[in-house]
Amino acid sequence: MPKFSIIVPVYNVEKYIKKCLDSIFDQTFKDFEVIVVNDGTKDNSMDIVKKYDVKIVEQTNQGLSEARNNGVKKATGQYLIFIDSDDYIERELLERINGSLDNNPDLVRFQVKNIIDGKEIEHKEKEYTNLSGEEAFKKIIECYYVEPAWLYAIKRDYYNKNKFSFKKNAYHEDFGLMPLVIFKSNKVNIINYCGYCYVKRENSIITTKDYKKTLKKIDDTLAHYEYLIDGAKKTKKDTSIYNSFVSNSIILKITELNGKDYKKYLKEIKEKKVFDYLLNDTISRKIKNRLIKISPKFYYKLKRK
């Protein structure tokens, strides 16, 4: 059994896939397998992929979520790592993660570098060992990124035992799963090595501006919300901070909408009692909650000033 299974979905990334795979095979730690999932790519990406020693999983175009899910099914490693094919990793990443496995954690979080027009911006955090899922969640929600799946090495047995999977045909699939993966875990380590290089490019799923897609993203986020809240209810843990984070994420998301759509979804989240999950334990939070219930758009506009 290899220590790591690295899952790389591929769809029309011939300009980026070589750098991604080179960064994996240049790792100082060599006990890993690479699973490339061909998500029905229409360019020459797979011609490049076939030059590397990887497992290839073929599927018709079904999107990132199903590509990751199918990659997990073929994985044999102790820990799962997800890498997007237009990103890359630093050469000591696996070695640093491996050095954090002595206590057999369910989850190891590492750090990211944003790559924007060739410039690197590091986001470093403090290191922690043996955090419970609740403790880890409290730390992580203060960070620059919370839910990207590519910031974590996840124990495969833990992942499969909980029957985790990314929601098919949905936007924000990381938000729809990773908060629960963090929260339900029994032991989490956080290392401060900036090992993942996230390349921000135009026309990616995140950067594309399309109002119809925005509406679809809202619907998907609401479906994620119900899954995340229901999943946490099944634990015996204190869900107050977790539920507040998930609810704040939903409220912020609807502020992207215009006119009637905004009013429609605001009414819907009120009916779902989303606002009831917001933390209300301090004076500042009580004030915030009053303002945000009146108008999320107004509240976040004030907050940005």
Image (cartoon, rainbow, N blue to C red):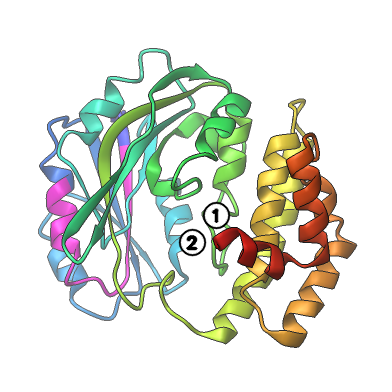
- Given residues 250 and 295, the one toward you in this image is 295
- Given residues 52 and 144, the one toward you in this image is 144
Q: Quadrant of residue 45?
A: bottom left
In the image, what residue type sits under mark 1? Phe
Q: Residue at x 72, y 52 (%)?
A: 247
Q: Position of residue 215 (x, y in %)?
A: 64, 79
**Which of disc 1 and disc 2 is earlier in sequence?**
2
In magenta stretch: residue 8: yes
Is 261 positioned to the left or the right of 272 in the image?
left
Q: Residue furthest front?
A: 305
Kind of element beneath mark 1: loop
- Above or below — where is 289 with respect to 295? above
In magenta stretch: residue 221: no
- Label 1 Cα neighbours within 10 Å, binned few <14 / some 14-19 / many ≥20: many
Q: Residue at x 74, y 26 (%)?
A: 237
Residue behind mark 1 = 166
- Label 2 Cα neighbours within 10 Å, binned few <14 / some 14-19 / many ≥20: many
Q: Position of residue 77 (x, y in %)?
A: 35, 34
Q: Position of residue 287 (x, y in %)?
A: 79, 49
Q: Quadrant of the C terminus?
A: bottom right
Q: Quadrant of residue 52?
A: bottom left
Between the residue at mark 2 and the residue at mark 1, the CA separation in whole angstroms equals: 7 Å
Q: Residue furthest top?
A: 103
Q: Residue at x 67, y 49 (%)?
A: 246
The answer to whether residue 76 is visible is no
The image's mark for residue 66 is 2
Magenta region: which residues?
5-23
Is 258 positioned to the left or the right of 40 in the image?
right
In the image, what residue type sits under mark 2? Glu
Circles 2 and 1, Cβ within 8 Å, touching? The answer is yes
